Image (cartoon, coloured by chain):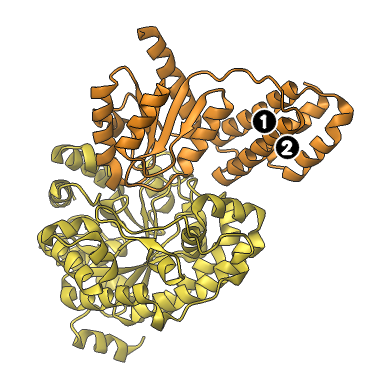
Chain colours: A orange, B yellow
């Protein structure tokens, strides 16, 4: 990758917002394509995701990298509004289960999925069954991803999964959050469990591939 | 040694501040109790005391950390538990009577201090109190510098908690150790700012965050001292952000370390024990012990430098009493027998030589049956 693009990638990984702004200010003279810049931004975020998984960086450092990534994407789109971006793949609905308002983990996963090419419908927090089902009806997701940090809201996850299985049986459900582990996730009826933001992407890919194979 | 303080406590029927007694005397007493425990049943206080001083009691002490789960016993609601000290005492005391335990930790919820710093709270009926994040007290980074200390006397939630402490210490008396609770300054600030923004601010604007920690700590020190003044013999400091769920280790030391040391020193000066509670993933036991020098470390997950429970015991078992760490997930999905089996596994590794109190990693899940709390009690009795 070109040195300038490498710098762009590094700016995301290191969370260097000021340098990212400077990069775009200088970019016009260099004639680097918007598509290449997007690829560099995504590579930087992927580097950060891997580093988070390996405990080389922390959650706040990843969040800062994410902010720089988002700023970079905004700047690319401002400069090249007609840039053809690769069509988003499957729809993923994500949200924090009803009764819970802790959305840090969910926000990280949503951003990672979005940067990885999925079309993410983020319903936010304290998502009721009705709102979730409305979104499923509208978007026909490949996977539904639910988050719960509090043990008090786990009963709601179980109810929602049960409802999804009745109404939309082919749609796999992925769960994650501090109150869960793999055994509990499957006891509640989930099809997948994400121990971390890193593993969430791998799990989603597996669930999507499995769903495509079965359909 | 403050003899009058000791006698004053005894005359009220409550446990005296343990650190008012010379350490050598306490160690000797613990040895004697440990020896007695080989031949007869100990009282709950003797059992806990013995374990705290790294002597093996008659069986491992256990606390189910029922907290808000005990509200089911009398049908008290979450909002009443959060807002009314007397009703909260009914919850904790009924849990102690119904299920038992050698230690009661008054973990109400994590919103107490933040509420008194002006954070709008929601009090749902089916879960613990939480901030209304649409209206954070700290909206921008500049708001850290505008944060003012609050007058403890006017702090409603903290005053209700002190009422809870006062009632519980007298109701339980010599039948069990009652521990207080303080959310560390980083935790309080995260409630006022929102966790995501707070975490980033710690990296990007550490000076501003530290200044706010300083102001919050002024109040937390008074709050912890006030808990000790009610007769509480031990106070737990919650330092969630000292873990991989929170800040990098060096950043935590920089942001919160000196301030939790201040709180810890204040508690010790009052003669009480210091506990650290951290239910985050991979907690940083090394730096928490360095800054707070606690008597007790309560965890939900293995520390970042321990591969397994055996290494936990080896690294930290002589320095601190470990409380934990049956998982929330097991308590929710497991049968009583599975819970007993896991407790036995942990007891086998961690209880040898004292220095271990069996407990859930965090508070007992509030909305499930109490069966698995009974299972933990049984495991301690049978295998401890």
Tell me where residue A25 appears, x and y as whole percent: 83, 38
Give B371 or B304, whichever is nearer the viewer: B371
Q: Which mark is residue B94?
A: none
Is B286 located above or below residue B344 in the figure?
below
Q: Secondary structure at mark 1?
A: helix
Q: Which residue is mark 1?
A: A44
Give A72 or B85, whichever is nearer the viewer: A72
Give A6 or B141, whichever is nearer the viewer: B141
Q: Residue at x 55, y 43 (%)?
A: A59
User: Does residue A191 show up?
Assistant: yes
Tag 2: Cα neighbours inside 10 Å, few (<14), some, or many (≥20)?
Answer: many
Q: Which mark is residue A11?
A: 2
Tell me where residue B324 appears, x and y as whole percent: 31, 51
The extreme right residue here reads A29
Identify the chain of the residue marked 2, using the numbered disc in the image. A
Identify the chain of the residue marked 1, using the numbered disc in the image. A
Q: Residue at x 46, y 59 (%)?
A: B191
Is A178 located above or below residue A167 in the figure?
below
Give B246 or B135, whichever is nearer the viewer: B135
Is A182 located above or below residue B106 in the figure?
above
Q: Tell me which corner region of the image, top left, top right, bottom left or bottom right, holds residue A181.
A: top left
User: Where does the N terminus of chain B fall, quadrant-wise?
Assistant: bottom left
How far is the residue under mark 1 from the one under mark 2?
Answer: 8 Å
User: Does residue B349 show up?
Assistant: no
């Amino acid at each position: 990758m070109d040195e300038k693009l490498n710098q762009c990638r590094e700016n995301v990984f290191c969370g260097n917002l000021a340098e990212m702004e400077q990069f775009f200010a200088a970019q016009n003279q260099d004639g680097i394509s918007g598509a290449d810049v997007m690829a560099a931004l995504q590579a930087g975020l992927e580097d950060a995701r891997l580093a988070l998984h390996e405990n080389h960086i922390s959650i706040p450092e990843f969040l800062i990298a994410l902010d720089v990534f988002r700023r970079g994407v905004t700047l690319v789109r401002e400069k090249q509004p007609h840039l053809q971006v690769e069509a988003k793949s499957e729809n993923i609905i994500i949200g924090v289960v009803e009764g819970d308002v802790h959305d840090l983990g969910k926000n990280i996963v949503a951003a990672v999925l979005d940067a990885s090419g999925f079309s993410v419908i983020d319903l936010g927090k304290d998502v009721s069954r009705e709102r979730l089902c409305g979104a499923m009806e509208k978007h026909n997701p490949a996977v539904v991803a639910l988050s719960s940090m509090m043990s008090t809201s786990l009963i709601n996850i179980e109810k929602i999964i049960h409802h999804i299985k009745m109404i939309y049986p082919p749609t796999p459900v992925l769960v994650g959050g501090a109150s869960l582990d793999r055994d509990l996730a499957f006891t509640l009826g989930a099809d997948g469990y994400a121990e971390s933001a890193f593993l969430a992407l791998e799990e989603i890919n597996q669930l999507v591939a499995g769903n495509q194979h079965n359909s | 040694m403050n003899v009058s303080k000791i006698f004053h406590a005894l005359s009220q029927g409550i446990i005296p501040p343990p650190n008012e007694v010379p350490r050598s005397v306490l160690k000797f007493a613990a040895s004697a109790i440990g020896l007695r425990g080989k031949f007869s049943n100990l009282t709950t206080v003797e059992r806990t005391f013995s374990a705290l001083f790294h002597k093996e009691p008659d069986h491992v002490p256990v606390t189910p950390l029922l907290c808000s789960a005990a509200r089911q016993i009398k049908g008290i609601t979450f909002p009443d538990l959060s807002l009314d000290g007397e009703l909260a005492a009914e919850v904790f005391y009924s849990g102690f009577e119904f299920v038992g335990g050698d230690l009661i930790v008054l973990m109400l919820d994590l919103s107490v201090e933040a509420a008194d710093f002006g954070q709008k709270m929601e009090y749902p009926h089916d879960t613990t109190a939480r901030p209304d994040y649409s209206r954070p007290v700290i909206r921008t980074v500049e708001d850290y510098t505008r944060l003012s200390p609050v007058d403890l006397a006017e702090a409603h939630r903290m005053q209700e908690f002190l009422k809870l402490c006062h009632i519980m210490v007298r109701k339980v008396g010599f039948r069990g150790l009652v521990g207080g609770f303080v959310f560390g300054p980083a935790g309080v600030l995260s409630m006022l700012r929102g966790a995501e923004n707070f975490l980033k601010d710690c990296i990007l604007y550490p000076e501003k965050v530290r200044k706010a920690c300083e102001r919050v700590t002024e109040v937390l020190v008074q709050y912890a001292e006030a808990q000790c003044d009610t007769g509480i013999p031990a106070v737990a400091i919650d330092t969630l952000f000292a873990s991989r769920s929170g800040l990098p280790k060096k950043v935590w030391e920089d942001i919160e370390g000196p301030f939790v040391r201040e709180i810890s020193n204040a508690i010790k000066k009052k003669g009480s024990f210091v506990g650290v509670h951290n239910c985050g993933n991979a907690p940083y036991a090394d730096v928490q012990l360095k800054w707070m020098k606690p008597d007790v470390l309560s965890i939900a997950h293995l520390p970042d430098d321990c591969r397994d429970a055996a290494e936990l015991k080896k690294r930290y078992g002589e320095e601190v009493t470990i409380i934990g760490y049956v998982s929330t997930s097991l308590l929710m999905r497991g049968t009583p027998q599975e819970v007993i089996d896991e407790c036995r596994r942990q007891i086998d590794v961690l209880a040898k030589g004292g220095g271990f109190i069996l407990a859930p990693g965090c508070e007992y899940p509030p909305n499930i049956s109490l069966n698995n709390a009974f299972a933990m009690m049984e495991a301690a009795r049978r295998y401890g």
